[in-house]
Image (cartoon, grey):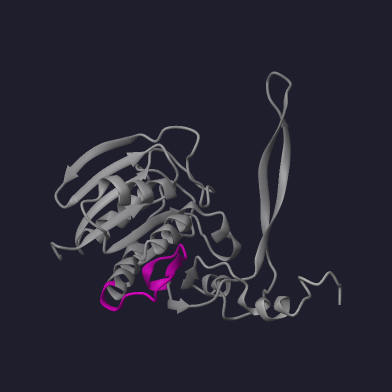
Amino acid sequence: MDKDRLILITNDDGIHAKGIEALVNVAKSFGNVVVVAPTEGQSGMSHAITVKTPIRVYKHGKNGNVEKFSCNGTPVDCVKMAMSKILPKEPDLILSGINHGGNSSSSVLYSGTMAAALEGCLYGIPSVGFSLLEFSKDADFSAATFFVNRIIDNILRRGLPKGVCLNVNIPYLKAEQIKGVMVCRQNHGIWREEFEHRTDPAGHDYYWLTGTFEDLEPHATDTDEWALRNQYIAITPVQFDFTAHKALHTLKQWNWNDGTTD
């Protein structure tokens, strides 16, 4: 363990989730760990921040080289709070997860797990979001942590490109069933949302969000979805720059300033 190394850990499943406990147990062998996580689950919050209510921080104590805090905000709030008020210095690494459930393809847009990693990236700190393809609160993270250890070691040794963080999705399999790691691009897929109509005991209508995922390129072999279907861990480099660079040249050819349409 590097006694001078500081690692910040957060998640979107809450301070008591089994996934964050598994991630802490791996990370503490690499350096000092500070956990700042939501007091309760914040799944699907994406990059939301709290602006209408006060943020409160709760200290959960210190055990060895691991210190824990929680706050009543979002995953991004947790990173901001850690950077601004809690950490004694800038961390060497920010880890988010291990999420209960996958965050491949377009799910990255809604993920609080990945939003926290992207927030770390905005600070210029190597950041990673980890997700396991199993939603159960009692999921077995033992196989996942074997590979998480290897991934963290690689990042600390080699670093990450500026402006890039990693989205790591791990199939829910035994370690010997996982074929390896595949660096891949984000799949083009969408969620087809449905709102299930229900009625409460008082006779009032309400709606529950459901839906199914539609893979729009099922035959592509270089995507995170393909990797996961074929028993590989999917590592996708992600950036916070949303600019559609391929469209810049086309749009610059338009007559924006002379009032014509040609």
Q: Residue furthest front?
A: 258
Q: Is residue 160 above or below residue 103?
A: below
Q: Residue at position x 26%, y 77% from top? A: 157
Count up the numbered dots. 0
Which residue is more in the foreground, 77 or 188?
77
Instruction: Say whether residue 85 is visible.
Output: yes
Which residue is more in the foreground, 122 or 213?
122
Q: Is residue 173 above or below residue 204?
A: below
x then y, percent, for residue 88: 20, 51
x then y, percent, for residue 113: 45, 55
Membership of 13 in magenta stretch: no
Quadrant, the C terminus: bottom right
Instruction: Say whether residue 219 is visible.
Output: no
Q: For this view, does 80 lie left or right of residue 45?
A: left
Q: Residue at position x 43%, y 55% from top? A: 116
x then y, percent, for residue 137: 43, 46
Q: For this view, does 239 lie left or right of residue 121?
A: right
Which residue is more in the foreground, 162 or 37?
162
Q: Residue furthest right?
A: 261
Quadrant, the N terminus: bottom left
The stretch in magenta equals 156-177
Q: Is residue 262 above or below residue 145?
A: below
Membership of 159 in magenta stretch: yes
x then y, percent, for residue 210: 66, 46
Q: Residue at position x 67%, y 74% from top? A: 218
